[in-house]
Image (cartoon, helix red, strand yellow):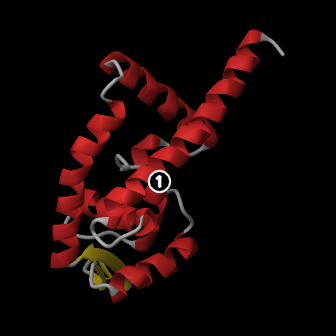
Amino acid sequence: MDSLDHTLMQLTTALTQASRAYKSMADKVASEYSLSQATALPVLILGRLGAEGVRPGVLADALGLEASSLVRVVDLLIDNGLIERREDPQDRRAKILQLTDDGTTRAAQMEAALIPFRRSVFGECDPADIDACLRVLTCIQSRIGKPSEQNPDKA
């Protein structure tokens, strides 16, 4: 194995481990709002995508999921009063997902809580390294087929 292959192996291992650790820590933040990381992320993303709401497929793309995988989570969030399905004003045959007032409040609270959380996670990192890391991750996403332009900043 040459040096580049060894470095790439270390990078992918570190990426996987960092992702798991980050999700675990983010789950603790979400739990403060009676949500899990899996249910908090759709609420956050809906908040970031705008008050007008979006079609389920758009939310699924932003989360990196198939629309069918999102149904159970959406139903749970509807049951918890955080989001609602509405008729799309552009096409009455279609539905949009929109945050309720409670969902909007929780999304804003979580966004505020994530600021110091992210700063504590990345606090020891040089801002130039963070920018370089973002460029590398964006490159990986585009090579794998998930353009970062379709994925708003995730938690």
Check the image and name the residue furthest to the right.
1
Q: Nearer the viewer, residue 90 or 19?
A: 19
Determine whether, in the image, residue 134 is placed left or right of residue 1.
Answer: left
Residue depicted at x 25% and y 80%: 89
Q: Which residue is mark 1?
A: 24
Residue 136 position in % (x across, y down): 51, 26
Residue 106 on image: x %, y %:
21, 68
The amino acid pointed to by label 1 is Ser
Residue 75: where, in percent of width, then height? 43, 84
Residue at the far top: name it. Answer: 3
Asked if 26 appears above or below 139 in the picture, the reply is: below
Callout 1 crowding tier (Cα within 10 Å): few <14, some 14–19, many ≥20:
some
Along the line of sight, the residue nearer the viewer: 8 or 23: 23
Picture residue at 18% right of the left edge, 77% below the top: 102
> What is the total number of numbered labels drawn onto the structure image?
1
Q: Looking at the image, is 50 positioned above or below residue 2?
A: below
Please identify the quadrant where the N terminus is shown: top right
Q: Is residue 6 above or below residue 83?
A: above
- Left or right? Give the position of 8 relative to 140: right
Residue 127: image location, x then y, percent: 31, 20
Q: Is residue 30 left or right of residue 139?
A: left
Quadrant in the rendering for residue 43 = bottom left
Residue displayed at 45% across by 26% down: 133
Horizontal relation, residue 20 to residue 29: left or right: right
For the point 59% across and 44% down, the residue is 145
Q: The residue tagged with tag 1: helix, strand or loop?
A: helix
